[in-house]
């Protein structure tokens, strides 16, 4: 369930970003439209972001539908990279860069991101599920310390750290 | 309390847990570094430990001493904790649900950092200090390989779920768990979200690692997403069903 919620939330986020991109490329000249839409679309984006959690699935479906339509209708868009509009999210302001190739979106990368205090942030550092055999393991002889929830001085005796200390690793 | 004679020469008891020290390439250097670290922890313990009824912090908790009359280190530690409360949107807080000011996490991290500095001041560049599972290192391990830290498996304390080499940008790692301090006389910190049973955070400094790990345990996935976006950290989180979450730069198996 949690994984599904994560996927829906991610889809909702993508929908917000895509919506922002569509607003930014509604005109014929991508660069000029992006510049002029910068102010107004931010308000729209903020509304989307706040409703995203309650109706995330609907938003994602709608965005996917309109997104593909735009793709077909937008065959006149020249190949290249276009900055999207800045969208307000609960993490702060988000702006993505969209790469168009052969009339289709081939890449979406985050540009400048700032949090509510104006600090640069990165949504690309988001944690994602990983299998146990995908994380790095090491032989105990190469490990010097074990990081875990704090053990009491009494529990230390049975801890892995006590064994490493005794061995001098 | 563990008797000193039951501990190996590279470890000592402090702050209700055990501190392990590695330094240099010889037992003599390591033994000297352990003594230096022990004196640093002793000083912090005396002033700021809730494990000691006679500490200044315990007297503050009982209302016998005003915080404004406490020593400058304790007031600075409190100011640091309050600043981190704002930086984590309240997920980390030095104020326990019962109203007691609990600076154990911050104080332990400050003691680890100061112990490391004190060891470094003796001319030893390669050292590691581990206080009950929170680790700060400098340089390389003897033999020239990076310091490697194992992450305890919350479901099996004798096993590790992962390991991580520490380096210049990530010299520190701290792990916070829902079972933390479970057998201590003080009640554990207020856990508002049960998403994770254990959160490990690697950072450039031990205070950031410790505070962010504690905040994510308290605040769950929402706090995880907010703090990984704003802080320079790598995170490995273990959910209550045993599955893992990792940030992109957490080391992967080859």
Image (tube, coloured by chain):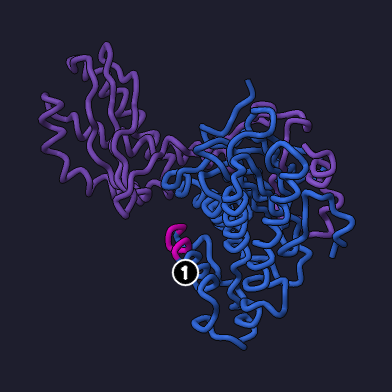
Res B159 → quadrant: top right
Number of numbered markers: 1
Q: Position of residue A158 (x, y in %)?
A: 86, 49
Q: Which residues are magenta?
A: B83-88
- Residue situated in front as seen by the camera: A70 or B142: B142
Query: Looking at the colours in the rendered structure, which chain would you say is drawn in purple?
Result: A
- Residue situated in front as seen by the camera: B93 or B6: B6
- In this rendering, is residue B220 above or below A5? below
The residue wearing badge 1 is B79
Residue B178 is covered by the magenta coloring: no
Q: Quick one: label 1, few (<14), some, or many (20+) residues within 10 Å?
A: few
Query: Looking at the colours in the rendered structure, which chain would you say is drawn in blue?
Result: B
Q: Quadrant of the C terminus of chain A?
A: top right
- Residue situated in front as seen by the camera: B177 or A94: B177
| Mark 1 belongs to chain | B
Instruction: For mark 1, give the secondary structure.
Output: helix
Residue at the image position 68 percent from the left and 56 percent from the top:
B36
As drawn, is B5 to the left or to the right of B53? right
Q: Visible in this render: residue A48?
A: no
Residue at the image position 50 percent from the left and 36 percent from the top:
A7
Q: Quadrant of the N terminus of chain A?
A: top right
Residue at the image position 30 percent from the left and 29 percent from the top:
A66
Q: Visible in this render: residue B162?
A: yes
Q: Position of residue B74 (x, y in %)?
A: 55, 72
Looking at this rendering, what residue extends furthest in the top direction? A102
Q: Position of residue A109 (x, y in %)?
A: 34, 28
Residue at the image position 72 percent from the left and 74 percent from the top:
B52
Task: Please tell me whether the stretch drawn in magenta is mainly helix, strand or loop.
Answer: helix
């Amino acid at each position: 369930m949690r994984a599904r919620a994560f996927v829906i939330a991610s889809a909702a986020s993508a929908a917000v970003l895509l919506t922002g991109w569509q607003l930014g490329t509604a005109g014929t000249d991508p660069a000029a439209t992006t510049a002029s839409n910068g102010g107004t679309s931010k308000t729209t984006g903020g509304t989307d972001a706040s409703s995203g959690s309650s109706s995330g699935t609907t938003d994602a479906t709608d965005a996917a539908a309109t997104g593909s339509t735009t793709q077909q209708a937008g065959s006149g868009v020249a190949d290249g990279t276009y900055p999207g509009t800045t969208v307000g999210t609960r993490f702060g302001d988000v702006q993505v860069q969209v790469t168009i190739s052969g009339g289709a979106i081939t890449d979406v990368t985050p540009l400048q991101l700032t949090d509510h205090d104006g600090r640069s942030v990165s949504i690309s550092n988001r944690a994602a599920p990983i299998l146990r055999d995908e994380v790095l393991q090491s032989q105990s002889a190469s490990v010097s310390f074990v990081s875990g929830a704090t053990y009491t001085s009494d529990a230390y005796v049975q801890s892995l750290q006590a064994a490493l200390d005794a061995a001098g690793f | 309390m563990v008797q000193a004679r039951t501990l190996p020469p590279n470890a000592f008891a402090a702050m209700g847990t055990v501190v392990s020290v590695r330094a240099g390439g010889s037992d003599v250097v390591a033994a000297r570094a352990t003594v230096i670290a022990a004196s640093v922890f002793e000083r912090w313990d005396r002033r700021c430990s809730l494990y000691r009824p006679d500490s200044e912090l315990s007297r503050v908790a009982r209302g016998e001493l005003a915080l404004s009359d406490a020593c400058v280190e304790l007031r600075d530690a409190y100011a640091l904790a309050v600043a981190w409360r704002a930086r984590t949107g309240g997920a980390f807080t030095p104020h326990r649900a019962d109203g007691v000011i609990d600076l154990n996490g911050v104080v332990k991290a400050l003691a680890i950092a100061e112990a490391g500095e004190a060891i470094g001041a003796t001319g030893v560049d390669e050292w590691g200090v581990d206080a009950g599972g929170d680790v700060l290192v400098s340089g390389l391990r003897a033999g020239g390989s990076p310091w490697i830290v194992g992450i305890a498996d919350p479901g099996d304390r004798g096993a590790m779920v992962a390991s991580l080499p520490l380096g210049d940008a990530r010299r520190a790692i701290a792990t916070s768990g829902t079972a933390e301090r479970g057998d201590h006389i003080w009640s554990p910190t207020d856990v508002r979200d049960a998403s994770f049973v254990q959160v490990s955070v690697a950072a450039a400094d031990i205070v950031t690692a410790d505070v962010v790990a504690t905040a994510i345990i308290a605040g769950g996935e929402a706090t995880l997403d907010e703090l990984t976006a704003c802080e320079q950290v790598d995170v490995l989180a273990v959910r209550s069903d045993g599955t893992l979450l990792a940030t992109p730069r957490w080391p992967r198996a080859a």
